[in-house]
Image (spheres, grey):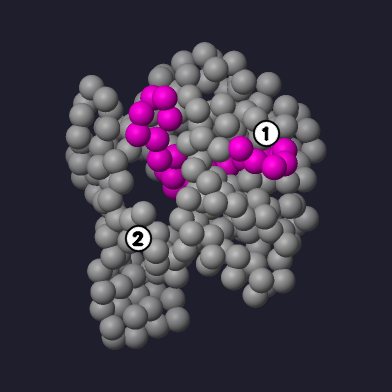
């Protein structure tokens, strides 16, 4: 396991730029417009520090989280205990998993669909199909590559400070095999914790998923239907009309 995921507190700060309430608002708008069933439960794949857990539970949803990192899950469990939240947090590999209960909504965020091979994608979607109730939705955030990884910009950098801890995050992508569509993603956190500096680096080899390939895969597996994809978490911005793509989401429905 990468050292990056052994440091959930710093990871949480690094990715705290998101507007969690607005993102859960988007979830609920998707439920109203596209779900064929009433949504009472959610499962986050690659949940990490479970940033949406408190907001979802406060709105009456049953929260489930799945992650491979023991440290991340411990951090989430401690958070749930501290906040007095009831949550179901399970250690498993999102590429091939079983779950003890069915859920009404599944989501994976920030490109956390860490497939390395085509077979990983097949087992992943089969696993999701086994846990998601028919008519329910599967939302994927930034899991499809609309530009080749490591393109003209080569990466992204931002900085966040919380409670005296400053974290500068740099994400870079380097192609490995254009035939296998694999690339190396490096996430580096430059941390200043009340004057104590340290650098935390995580590296993962991932398989790029391109738009038309994604549609073909969904069609072939037959367990899902494509609902749509939008730019910047905004249902008024279909990707077909986007001049620049940023934080794209894609939505599937279980058939």
Point 30% across, 46% down: residue: 204
* Image location of residue 145, percent across then percent down: 36, 33
* Image location of residue 48, percent across then percent down: 50, 56
> Which quadrant of the figure has residue 120?
top left
* Image location of residue 82, percent across then percent down: 65, 75
Instruction: Locate the C terminus by quadrant.
Output: top right
The vertical placement of 135 against 103, above or below, is: above
Q: Are marks 2 and 1 in contact (CB under 8 Å)?
A: no
Front one among 170 and 119:
119
The vertical placement of 140 against 87, above or below, is: above
Residue matched to label 2:
4
* Image location of residue 142, percent across then percent down: 43, 40
Q: Earlier in the sequence, mark 2 or mark 1?
A: 2
**Mark 2 closeness class: few <14, some 14–19, many ≥20 residues within 10 Å:** some
The circle drawn on residue 132 is 1
Magenta stretch, residue numbers: 98-120
The vertical placement of 149 against 75, above or below, is: above
- For the residues marked 2 and 1, what is the alpha-carbon distance in whole angstroms? 30 Å
Instruction: Locate the N terminus by quadrant.
Output: bottom left
Q: Tell me if 143 is positioned left or right of 136 in this view.
A: left
Front one among 214 and 161:
214
Point 41% across, 20% down: residue: 213
């Amino acid at each position: 396991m990468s050292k990056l995921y052994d440091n959930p507190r710093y990871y949480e700060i690094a990715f705290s730029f998101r507007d969690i309430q607005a993102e859960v608002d988007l979830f609920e708008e998707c439920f109203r417009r596209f779900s064929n069933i009433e949504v009472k439960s959610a499962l986050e794949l690659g949940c990490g520090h479970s940033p949406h857990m408190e907001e979802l539970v406060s709105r009456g949803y049953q929260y489930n989280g799945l992650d491979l990192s023991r440290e991340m899950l411990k951090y989430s469990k401690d958070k749930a205990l501290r906040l007095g939240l009831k949550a179901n947090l399970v250690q498993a590999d999102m590429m091939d998993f079983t779950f003890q209960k069915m859920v009404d909504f599944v989501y994976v965020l920030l490109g956390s669909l860490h497939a390395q091979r085509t077979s990983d994608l097949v087992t992943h979607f089969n696993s999701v199909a086994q846990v998601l109730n028919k008519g329910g939705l599967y939302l994927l955030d930034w899991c499809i590559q609309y530009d080749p990884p490591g393109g003209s910009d080569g990466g992204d950098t931002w900085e966040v400070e919380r409670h005296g801890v400053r974290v500068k995050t740099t994400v870079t992508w380097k192609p490995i095999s254009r035939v296998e569509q694999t690339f190396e993603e490096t996430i580096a956190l430059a941390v200043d914790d009340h004057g104590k500096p340290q650098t935390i680096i995580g590296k993962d080899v991932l398989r790029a998923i391109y738009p038309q390939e994604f549609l073909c895969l969904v069609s072939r597996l037959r367990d899902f239907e494509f609902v749509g994809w939008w730019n910047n978490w905004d249902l008024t911005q279909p990707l077909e009309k986007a001049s620049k793509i940023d934080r794209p989401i894609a939505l599937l429905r279980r058939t």
